[in-house]
Image (cartoon, rainbow, N blue to C red):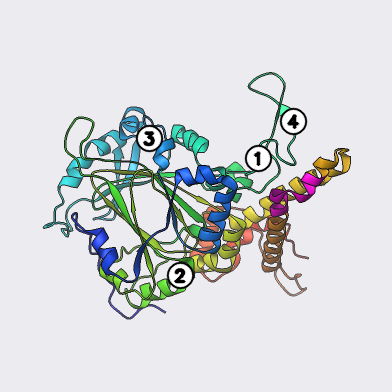
């Protein structure tokens, strides 16, 4: 039911805001837990994967990995590289003050970020007529993508199709394309991102860059379809630019919540602030966060800070300084698919939100992929005369985890089949119309009737749903 209270207004954060004092003086505020990138390397990727599962996915709390800039190419992840290599590319920037889009070249925007920042001070930061231009949701350069792929742990990277070890249980020998002889492939294991199971044409391209200046922001929202969010600040302004001109140090303030508080956050947003958290239109005032009946986790994100965002947990971001540059992406796992089908998708339909992640198709193709992998493991066990190899295939932790995920995917698949099954057409009933998959058609149907189960009718052919 819509809130009867007046909607809370937008109140910006002043440039000289003291974040440390706010956290110290507010009992319900605390900083997000941090670990260093060195710790990840020392403890190993397997332990890191367990930490992400227990703390972020199951525990539902955000996590920051600091010091990630140590392993980034200092010449590539810079505003100068963007200006030299992508400067002539035109992008859609968002004028947050007017809620309109502007078409700007990358070089023009980067060259004017100091002007956009220096217009703000402690006296005029509430001026509604000044520009807040945010270059958000722009495609990540291919060079950045490849370099991040070499650096970011596979278990949390974009479109990762296997977290198996090279030469691990279930691996095979393939021709070495880079030289003579054969090379071992990765062992059998689950994917870090189940979006990778989809055919390329069906995947949502969500590896995006966000470039902002003082006063730009992202309203409170959840990650789409209960997915896991990853956000890495790759570069930010310091006290001087490359030409020696003074700049304001760049950082981003995050206000974050836990997954377990999501219903409380949603109710608070609607009943007290007069906004629907699903609409993603309101940046909450600091006083609203201070008065909230749930804990708020704070991050001041600086260069090298890699933030892991738990599923379904609302959060908002405020950019500070002359320049912040971030790369972000989302991942889909078995756990997020369960939350998507039970909660995120029904809520999205209620507000007519476009479901860009084809969760039901992901279930189908992931189940098919995992089935083939497990069949491959069984075949290796049957033909191998090496008893140690047989034992490795039988007791490998990664293969056993794959089996568990397969069972969970099969349960979701069964749920989808039952929900999309059609009763046989009676002699006096009109036969329904079959709609081939078309995302535009799906959106039109959803906007006509948000409560209708028809939006996914177009995917029915992927699941062999038939009527008599």
Q: Label 2 near label 1: C-beta < 8 Å? A: no
CA neighbours of label 1 inside 10 A, class few (<14), some (14 to 19), many (20+): some
Disc 2 on helix, strand or loop?
Answer: helix
CA neighbours of label 2 inside 10 A, class few (<14), some (14 to 19), many (20+): some
Q: Label 3 near label 1: C-beta < 8 Å? A: no
Identify the residue under disc 2.
262
Q: Which region is colored magenta?
A: 391-402
**Which residue of the protein is positioned furthest toward the left in this rendering?**
123
Q: Nearer the viewer, residue 169 or 159?
A: 169
Identify the residue under disc 4.
173
Locate residue 274, reporting x and y percent: 33, 74
Locate residue 297, reporting x and y percent: 38, 63
Locate residue 31, reporting x and y percent: 36, 60
Q: Which mark is residue 77?
A: 3
Q: Earlier in the sequence, mark 4 or mark 3?
A: 3
Query: Which residue is rendered at x = 63% and y = 54% of the image?
Result: 361
Disc 3 on helix, strand or loop?
Answer: loop
Query: Which residue is rendered at x = 33% and y = 77% of the image?
Result: 272
Q: Earlier in the sequence, mark 1 or mark 2?
A: 1
């Amino acid at each position: 039911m819509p809130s009867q209270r007046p909607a809370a207004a937008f109140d910006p954060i002043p440039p000289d805001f003291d974040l440390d004092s706010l956290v110290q003086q507010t009992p319900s505020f605390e900083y997000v837990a941090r670990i260093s990138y060195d710790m990840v390397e020392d403890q190993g990727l397997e332990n890191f994967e367990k930490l992400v599962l227990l703390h972020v996915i199951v525990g539902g709390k955000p996590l920051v990995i600091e010091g990630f800039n140590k392993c980034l190419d200092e010449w590539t992840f810079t505003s100068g590289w963007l200006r030299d290599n992508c400067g002539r590319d035109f992008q859609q920037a968002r004028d947050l003050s007017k809620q309109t889009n502007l078409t700007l070249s990358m070089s023009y925007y980067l060259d004017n970020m100091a002007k956009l920042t220096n217009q703000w001070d402690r006296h005029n930061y509430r001026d509604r007529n000044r520009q807040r231009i945010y270059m958000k949701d722009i495609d990540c350069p291919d060079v950045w993508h490849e370099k991040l792929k070499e650096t970011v742990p596979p278990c949390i990277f974009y479109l990762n199709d296997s977290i198996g070890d090279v030469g691990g249980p279930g691996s095979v020998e393939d021709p070495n394309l880079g030289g003579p002889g054969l090379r071992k492939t990765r062992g059998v294991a689950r994917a870090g991102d189940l979006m990778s199971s989809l055919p390329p044409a069906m995947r949502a391209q969500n590896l995006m860059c966000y470039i902002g200046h003082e006063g730009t922001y992202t309203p409170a929202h959840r990650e789409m379809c209960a997915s896991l969010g990853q956000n890495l600040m790759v570069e930010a302004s310091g006290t001087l630019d490359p030409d020696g001109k003074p700049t304001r140090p760049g950082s981003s303030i995050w206000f974050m919540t836990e997954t377990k508080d999501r219903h409380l956050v949603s109710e608070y947003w609607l009943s007290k602030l007069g906004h629907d958290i699903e609409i993603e239109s309101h940046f909450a005032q600091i006083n609203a966060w201070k008065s909230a009946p749930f804990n708020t986790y704070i991050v001041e994100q600086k260069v090298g800070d890699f933030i892991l965002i738990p599923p379904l947990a609302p959060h908002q971001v405020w950019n500070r300084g002359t320049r912040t540059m971030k790369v972000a992406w989302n991942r889909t796992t078995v756990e997020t698919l369960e939350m998507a089908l039970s909660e995120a998708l029904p809520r999205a339909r209620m507000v007519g939100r476009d479901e860009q992640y084809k969760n039901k198709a992901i279930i189908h193709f992931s189940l098919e992929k995992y089935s083939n992998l497990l069949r491959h493991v069984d075949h290796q066990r049957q033909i191998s005369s090496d008893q140690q190899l047989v034992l490795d295939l039988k007791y490998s932790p990664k293969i056993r985890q794959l089996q568990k995920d397969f069972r969970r995917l099969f349960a979701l698949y069964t749920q989808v089949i039952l929900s999309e099954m059609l009763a046989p057409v009676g002699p006096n009933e009109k036969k329904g119309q079959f709609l081939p998959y078309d995302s535009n058609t799906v959106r039109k149907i959803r906007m006509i009737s948000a409560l209708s189960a028809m939006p996914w009718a177009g995917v029915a052919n992927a699941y062999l749903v038939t009527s008599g």
